[in-house]
Amino acid sequence: MKIAMWSGPRNLSTAMMYAFGNRPDFAVWDEPFYAAYLRHSGADHPMRDEIIAAHEGDPDMIAAMCSGSIPDEKPNFYMKHMGLHMLEGFPMDWAKDCINIHLIRHPARVVASYGAKRDEVTLDDIGFRQQVEVFDKVGGVVIDSHDIRDDPAGMLKKLCAIIDLPFDPAMLTWPAGGHKSDGIWARHWYGAVHRSTGFAGAEGPLPVLSGHDAKLVSAALPFYEKMQTQAI
């Protein structure tokens, strides 16, 4: 089984990678197209030059690796993808052979979290539009990170049942300190999840935002709401 898990930034995506990565039957891959996205888009992200130097930047080569054999002779492969990384012209045919899952989060929570890591955040940075574009191309299962944090065991059991994968309780915890498959960017983005050993508790009320952040949430909300109607 190959799973392509699509999300945007600040969206429980790393915790989900750790959940699957803690299963003995899964290999995981952290944001395969990130370096290619930075190289071809010119986007100015933290650690840009280091990421491009350390990771494969040819989208055709990455697509071939997504279609190829599973690392470490594992029976299953979990690939953590960002919809915003799939620039026009990047190959997508490989995704047709995957179980595509789309992890979503309310844009108010994403903007509040992402803004703490980067200045001058734009709609393209948070990936809601691009995630809908990917969903329209490949379809798949939609799951809301809010529901996972509210009931990790229940939602992961539900997800596993839908994709015909036996649930493993190992998905609910993982060792602190990160995963061997973390991208080089982990030291900038993954501090909180590196300190964790499982999913954080249920989320509180939506953050109240103003100014540019509130406008950004309003622009992203229709894309989120379209996906949320499909959520399990």
Image (cartoon, rainbow, N blue to C red):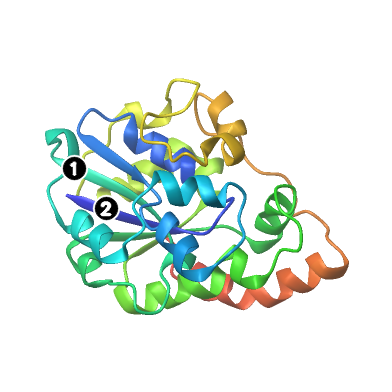
Name above or below for residue 28 compared with residue 111.
above
**Looking at the rendering, in which quadrant would you find the C terminus?**
bottom left
Disc 2 and disc 1: Cα gap in Å? 8 Å
Mark 2 vs 1: CB contact within 8 A? yes
Residue at 46% x, 28% y is 178
Q: Position of residue 148 (x, y in %)?
A: 49, 45
Tag 2: Cα neighbours inside 10 Å, few (<14), some, or many (≥20)?
many
Q: Which residue is identified by label 1?
A: 76
Quadrant of res 162: bottom left
- Find the residue positioned furthest to the right: 211
Image x and y of residue 78, in percent? 29, 46
Tell me where residue 215 sits by quadrant: bottom right
Dot 2 lies on which element?
Answer: strand
Q: Residue 30's x, y, as percent?
A: 39, 45
Could you tell whether 114 is left or right of 21 in the image? right
Relative to 218, residue 201 above or below: above
Q: Earlier in the sequence, mark 2 or mark 1?
A: 2
Q: Which residue is mark 2?
A: 3
Q: Position of residue 93 (x, y in %)?
A: 22, 72
Is residue 191 in view from this perspective? yes
Q: How many marks?
A: 2
> Mark 2: which amino acid?
Ile
Q: Is residue 229 visible?
A: no
Disc 1 residue crowd, few under 14, some 14–19, many 20+, Cα 10 Å: some
Q: Is residue 35 left or right of residue 117?
A: left
At label 1, the amino acid type is Asn
